Amino acid sequence: MVDMPLMGVVLAGGKSSRMGTDKANLPHPQQPNPNRVITYLQHAVVRLGPLVSTIAISGRSEDMKSVANVISIPDDSPHRGPAAGVAQSLRYAETLGFAGILVTPVDMPHLETDHLRCLIDAWQQKRNVTPSLVVAAMFADQQPEPLLAIYPTTLRWAIESMAQSNDRSLSRWLRQQTMVMVTLPQSAAKNVNRPEDL
């Protein structure tokens, strides 16, 4: 989709301390080719592929060796949480002329391309009317999922300021913004943080 004014971003930062190993390199539960293991990170990149022309990985640079043809956005503030990764990604997207970023976490293995397309459809319907609109996924708990969302570059400075503050909660910040929530099926909501989640 060459004309899509969004950059896709896989959020792959953090220490994976609760998992005990790098979540990005875990084998994905769906393995389409028995001769080649697909990791969580590779699956996250593949599901973005049909939707955007440019994909970035926000996180540690060592994650890049397993994925080709993507941009690396290394964590320059690894202890400041995902808000810092979103802020850095917005900064980079703005330099490339994108209108926003579609962020997706590396550790939600059941997300698929069609789920992400629902977010894009909602954003395209509203963005000319509300340029600072955030579109966020929502599951059964009715709360916005800040790591599965579209952030416009018009909010870059606001997110950078929040990411450098003492309150770096994207969830709290998001609830104060102009936002559209898109309900996705509960089957896509699984988040993998600990070995027992696998």
Image (cartoon, helix red, strand yellow):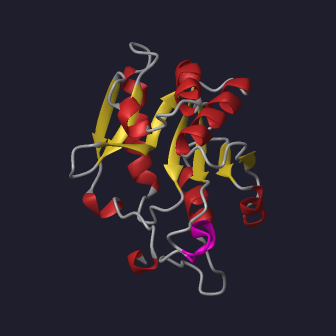
Residue at the outermost front position: 166
Q: Residue at x 46, y 54 (%)?
A: 113
- Residue located at (22% from left, 44% from top): 142
Q: Is residue 49 visible?
A: no
Along the line of sight, the residue nearer the viewer: 37 or 157: 157
Is 93 displayed left or right of 131 in the figure? right
Q: Quadrant of residue 8?
A: top right
Residue 40: where, in percent of width, then height?
Answer: 56, 67
Q: Residue at x 63, y 27 (%)?
A: 98
Q: Position of residue 147 (x, y in %)?
A: 46, 46
Residue 86 spot, x, y in % from top left? 57, 38
Q: Quadrant of the C terminus?
A: bottom left
- Please give left or right for residue 102 compared with residue 112 in the image: right
Is residue 22 on the magenta stretch? Answer: yes
Q: Position of residue 194 (x, y in %)?
A: 45, 73
The number of numbered badges drawn on the structure is: 0
Q: Is residue 156 above or below residue 184?
A: above
Q: Residue furthest top?
A: 129
Q: Is 42 one of the magenta-colored residues?
A: no
Q: Which secondary structure dominates the residues rendered in magenta?
A: loop
Give the camera-side residue of 24 and 113.
24
Could you tell whether 40 is left or right of 92 in the image?
left
Image quarter hosting the N terminus: top right
**Residues in magenta, as a range:** 20-27
Name the residue: 57% across, 24% down: 161
Q: Quadrant of residue 13?
A: bottom right
Q: Can residue 79 be seen in this snapshot?
A: yes
Left or right of residue 36, residue 107 in this image: left
Instruction: Reply above or below: 28 against 180.
Output: below
